[in-house]
């Protein structure tokens, strides 16, 4: 069965395989297009296990927010070359669309869920792993639903897709404040909304480290308690969003900005590729 240049082009677009690999697959399949697709995927999938131990330190963060729903994902690959490629970014968009429609916020459940094409998310990722020739990994996902959500995506390099993404859920919609707070979170990387959210075990750990450090520095015994509490307070302000100095006006806290906008932060997620 003969095949044409159009068949090779179509096969390349569907599988993201190289020109030579597509021609070889069509030759081996005697021109049968569907069999050629299967051959490329089978050959690619044989290499998946060999790639399992590789590091996926590149990739992208993709997000969408509308109608009181915000979704975000981090999709990783091995090289920035693949991260910049159309097929990798198409995969990210396909996964985000499914995340938006399914609203499944737990990673394991999302990976095992079935997409519109009848395949599980994990299967789709494995097939892309095969055709792109790199280890592809969905590292994490986030879903915020039921209240207004603001988002911010940041490119650390103009030739790469976004590497940092933030979703912020507000109690009451405030477009400008939401955008500003999202950008602030991207820059200052808070870990919690408020000090009450910090686990007690983390506070105690910081208190212990502060005390040991103060003693190593030879601080007077009588001053230890005050020094330790001061350093713990500094830690709390560093990791709590509401107590951080606002990025655009260091004289104000994030809490003050929210109060002025007559809203509050219910939750947030911040993803940075590889972190």
Image: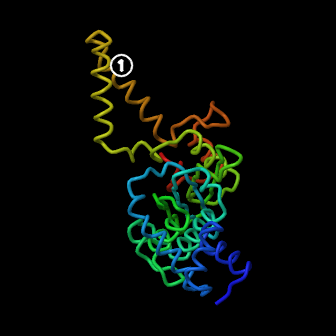
Residue 249 higher or lower than 184, as above or below: above
For the N terminus, the quadrant is bottom right
The residue depicted at 52 percent of the width and 80 percent of the height is 38
Residue at the spot 62% in from the left edge and 52% down from the top edge: 81
Give whichever of 59, 262 is nearer the camera: 59
Above or below, 2 relative to 190? below
Residue 274 percent coordinates (x, y): 49, 47
Q: Where is residue 73 shown, x and y percent of the image?
A: 53, 60
Above or below, 275 against 96 in this view is above
Q: Which residue is labeled 1 in the image?
A: 227
Q: Quadrant of residue 19?
A: bottom right
Q: Quadrant of residue 188?
A: top right
In-front residue for pair 105/251: 105
Type of colouring: rainbow
Q: Vertically, is 234 above or below 36?
A: above
Task: Answer few, some or many: residues within 10 Å of disc 1's Cα (few below 14, many 20 plus, some between 14 and 19).
Answer: some
Tell me the element at label 1: helix
Identify the residue at image location x=45%, y=70%: 45
What is the x, y in percent for residue 236? 42, 35
Closer to us: 12 or 144: 12
Where is residue 112 shown, x and y percent of the image? Answer: 40, 74
The image shows a total of numbered marks equal to 1
């Amino acid at each position: 069965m003969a095949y044409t240049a159009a068949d090779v082009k179509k096969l390349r677009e569907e599988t993201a395989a190289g020109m030579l690999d597509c021609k070889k697959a069509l030759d081996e399949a005697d021109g049968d297009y569907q069999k050629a697709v299967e051959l490329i995927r089978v050959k690619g999938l044989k290499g998946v296990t060999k790639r399992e131990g590789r590091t996926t330190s590149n990739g992208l963060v993709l997000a969408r927010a509308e109608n009181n729903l915000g979704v975000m994902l981090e999709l990783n690959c091995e090289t920035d070359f693949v991260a910049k490629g159309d097929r990798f970014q198409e995969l990210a968009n396909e996964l985000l669309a499914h995340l938006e429609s399914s609203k499944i916020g737990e990673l394991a459940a999302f990976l095992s869920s079935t997409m519109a094409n009848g395949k599980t998310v994990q299967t789709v990722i494995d097939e892309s792993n095969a055709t792109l020739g790199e280890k592809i990994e969905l590292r994490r996902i986030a879903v915020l639903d039921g209240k207004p959500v603001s988002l911010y995506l940041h490119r650390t390099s103009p030739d790469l897709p976004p590497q940092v993404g933030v979703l912020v859920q507000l109690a009451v919609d405030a477009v400008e404040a939401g955008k500003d707070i999202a950008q602030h979170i991207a820059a200052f990387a808070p870990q919690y909304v408020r000090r009450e959210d910090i686990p007690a075990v983390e506070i105690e750990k910081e208190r212990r480290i502060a005390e040991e450090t103060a003693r190593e520095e030879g601080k007077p015994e009588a001053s230890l308690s005050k020094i330790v509490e001061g350093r713990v307070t500094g830690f709390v302000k560093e990791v709590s969003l509401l107590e951080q100095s606002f990025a655009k006006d260091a004289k104000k806290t994030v809490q003050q900005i929210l109060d002025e906008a007559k809203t509050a932060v219910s939750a947030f997620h911040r993803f940075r590729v590889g972190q």
